[in-house]
Structures are given as structure tokens and as C-alpha cells.
Amino acid sequence: MIEFFDIGWLAIKSESKEAVIQSLNLSEPFIQLDWNTGISVVMGDIWDGVPFSRVYVSSPMRGWVLVVGDWISQTDKVALCQRLSETYEDVWAFSTQMRMDFWFYLYCKGGKIIRHFEKDGENIIDEGELLKKEKTLRKESLLDEEEDVNDPENWYGEDIVMGMAELFTIDPNELPEAMLKKQLGTLAVTDVGREKGISENPIEQWKES
């Protein structure tokens, strides 16, 4: 199983990946891939010099469609999530980029921001009311139990992001292997890929032997 790190994703309450692909205005070529290969391809696009050019759209899992790729972090994620939440019941966006001291979680519903917390170095966005159990996650993620729980510098952000994903959507790192083996998602091209092109390297290089 591919571990989630240095990556962003959307979690959209939906039972149709096709509807999500259309809502995001994603383009061909559409390639059907298993979970591990799909995630490997979008992460590999960075090393192939075409970052943000493709995303992997999962089939519905426990009522959620995941859209995986760092394109999420580079686009106007707030406007995107607000727009999507006018169509879908719940829309979340997440990212963990711990090596760059960058991480966030964003929740929109009915076209409005319900919760947005983001840390980008010393820059903090803290919008919306603190959600139930969010404070507990902050305490559990403290790098040192003696430190101030209200200071983001003292949190291990990846624990909070994955914890929020698990509490309110699904944690990609905790999905059962049996579920992932049945997963057949779609690799699709973003607006960045349409403008700048996609990798010409074969998909086969990312498939497990």
C-alpha cells in the first residue's frame, strides 16, 4: 500500500466518480488504474517534470470519492471546494507537506467555508469554529506534552491532517487492503496538464510486479 505523505487530496461525498470527474472539468486520456498504481503515477509526475498535470480519482469508498494529487494544493482550493459543496453534500480538502512546513484541512458545505486551518511556515489561516474533537487531535499531536496546545508550532501537522480525515471522511492510510484491491479509479488530466502537457513515460513503470 502506498503511504500518503507530501500530497494533497479532495474527499467528496459522492457515489459517482464519473460525476466528480465532470465537476472538476478533468480531461482525457482517462486511464483506469488500481489504487497503488494511480497514486504512484500522480506522485511520479513531480519527478517527471510535469507536476500538477494529473490526478487520481478513486471509485467510491464508504461513500467518499477521493481525488488525489498535489494539483489540489496549487489551485484555488477554497473557491473550488465552495463550488463543489453546492453540488455535493460534504467536500473536504487536505494536504500534508511536512518537509515544507505546509499543511491544511478545509471543509465546505452548502457553498460556505465551515472550517479552514492552514499552516504555511509562519503564516496561519484559522477560519471557522473549532470542530468537535479537533482540540483533542491538537493535544494528541503535540511534539512535547509540556508545550502550549494552542500554538501550531508545537503540533505535528501530519497527525492532525490524517486524524481529521479519519474523523470526518476516511483516512487513506487506514483503508483495508481488501478494499484497495477492488479499487479501480481513474487517472485524469487537469487544467495544468492540458496547458503544459503530461508525462510521456509509460504507466507500466509504476505498476507493482
Image: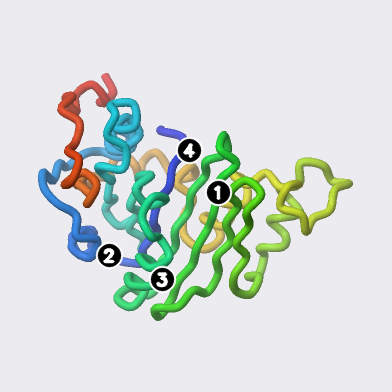
Picture coordinates of residue 72 (x, y %)?
A: 37, 52
Which residue matches tag 4? 6
Q: Earlier in the sequence, mark 3 or mark 2?
A: 2
Q: Is mark 3 on a helix, strand or loop?
A: loop
* 4 vs 2, front mark: 4
The vertical placement of 38 against 206, above or below, is below
Which residue matches tag 1? 103
Say the numbered circle drawn on residue 90: 3
How crowded is the residue under tag 4: few (<14 C-alpha within 10 Å), some, or many (20+)? some
Picture coordinates of residue 209 (x, y %)?
A: 26, 19
Picture coordinates of residue 167 (x, y %)?
A: 56, 60
Q: How far apart are marks 4 and 2 (CA)?
A: 27 Å
* Amino acid identity at mark 4: Asp
Q: What element carries label 4?
A: loop
Which residue matches tag 2? 15
Q: Is residue 62 left or right of residue 3?
A: left
Q: Distance between the residues labelled 1 and 3?
A: 20 Å
Q: How far apart are marks 1 and 2 (CA)?
A: 27 Å
Extreme-bottom residue of the structure: 110
- At horizontal 25% and vertical 43% (from top left) the residue drawn is 54
